[in-house]
């Protein structure tokens, strides 16, 4: 699939993996809808960087955990994009209260990390005649991985992978759906890490370091350009799974 001239919508595109993916798609010649929740300054920085490589990029604010805002986002996108060719469901959170008995954390994580993907996909599909969808999962969603202090996060990443496979069955061959499962990526979600904290995280990867957002973005572009992958989950975890770390 040649990505030149494609219209791409990326959620959570102002930072981390979303930002790197927006720039990577712009470098391929795509027009990118940069969806952000709060940080307009960061979104404008991404917009400026994308503008070095492609035209027609737009910025759209939306809290995609709220259905009304997803509908509003769609109305805004339709003003500039005649169609959507590619959807990257990237936005997500980590609830610091995540624990086996914290129901509020489960509800919050479900809304932001799972139902947001479902809602955005629902409202974007009418704009997609054909194309690609990539959902951003995590190795935490794999059987036997994750940890009790990220139990809600792990559960709904696992749900994303099941959703991906069944959505692929529903939409192929017109729209090909895949997911990507990163290990520990150096993103703002981690907050400010001390040198020791970063070393401890890196020790869980066979590559001996954290993964850079650009490395995940390259994997997403690979999925977008490959017309033979359908219902797959591409793992880029720096060997964390082999090391027994989730």
Image (cartoon, rainbow, N blue to C red):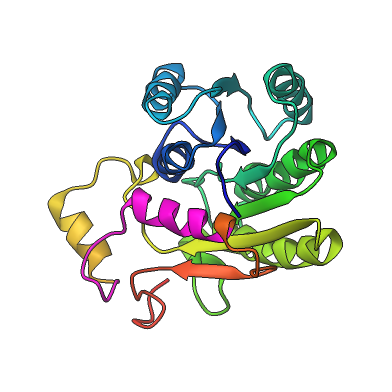
Q: Is residue 133 above or below residue 204?
A: above
Residue 147 visible within the image: no
Report the residue at 56% width, 73% height from top: 142
* 232 left or right of 52 in image: right
Q: Position of residue 207 (x, y in %)?
A: 24, 72
Residue 86 visible within the image: yes
* Residue 121, picture quadrant: top right
140 or 168, nearer to the observer: 168
Quarter of the picture containing the C terminus is bottom left
Q: In this view, does 51 lie above or below 243?
A: above
Range of residues picked out in magenta = 205-223
User: Is 216 contained in the magenta span?
Assistant: yes
Report the residue at 62% width, 54% height from top: 135
18 or 7, nearer to the observer: 7
Give the total of numbered labels: 0
Report the residue at 63% width, 70% height from top: 232
Q: Position of residue 5 (x, y in %)?
A: 59, 36
* 132 left or right of 195 in image: right
Quarter of the picture containing the N terminus is bottom right
Q: Is residue 195 above or below residue 140?
A: above
Q: Position of residue 157 (x, y in %)?
A: 60, 60
* 61 left or right of 17 in image: right
User: Is 222 contained in the magenta span?
Assistant: yes
């Amino acid at each position: 699939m040649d990505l030149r001239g494609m219209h791409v919508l990326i959620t959570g595109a102002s930072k981390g993996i979303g930002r790197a993916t927006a720039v990577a798609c712009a470098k391929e010649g795509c027009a990118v809808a940069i969806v952000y929740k709060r940080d307009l300054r960061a979104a404008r920085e991404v917009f400026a960087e994308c503008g070095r490589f492609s035209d027609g990029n737009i910025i759209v604010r939306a809290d995609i955990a709220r259905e009304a805002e997803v509908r509003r986002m769609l109305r805004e996108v339709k003003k500039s994009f005649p169609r959507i060719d590619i959807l990257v469901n990237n936005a997500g959170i980590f609830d610091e209260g995540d624990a086996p008995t914290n129901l509020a954390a489960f509800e919050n994580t479900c809304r932001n990390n799972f139902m947001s993907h479902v809602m955005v996909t629902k409202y974007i599909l009418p704009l997609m005649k054909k194309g690609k969808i990539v959902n951003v999962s995590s190795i935490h969603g794999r059987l036997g991985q994750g940890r009790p202090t990220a139990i809600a996060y792990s559960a709904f990443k696992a749900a994303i992978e099941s959703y991906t496979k069944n959505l692929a069955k529903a939409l192929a061959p017109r729209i090909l759906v895949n997911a990507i499962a990163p290990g520990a990526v150096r993103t703002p979600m981690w907050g400010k890490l001390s040198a020791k904290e970063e070393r401890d995280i890196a020790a869980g990867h066979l590559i001996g370091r954290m993964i850079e957002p650009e490395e995940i973005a390259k994997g997403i572009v690979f999925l977008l350009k490959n017309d033979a992958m359908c219902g797959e989950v591409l793992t880029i975890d720096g060997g964390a799974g082999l090391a027994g770390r989730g």
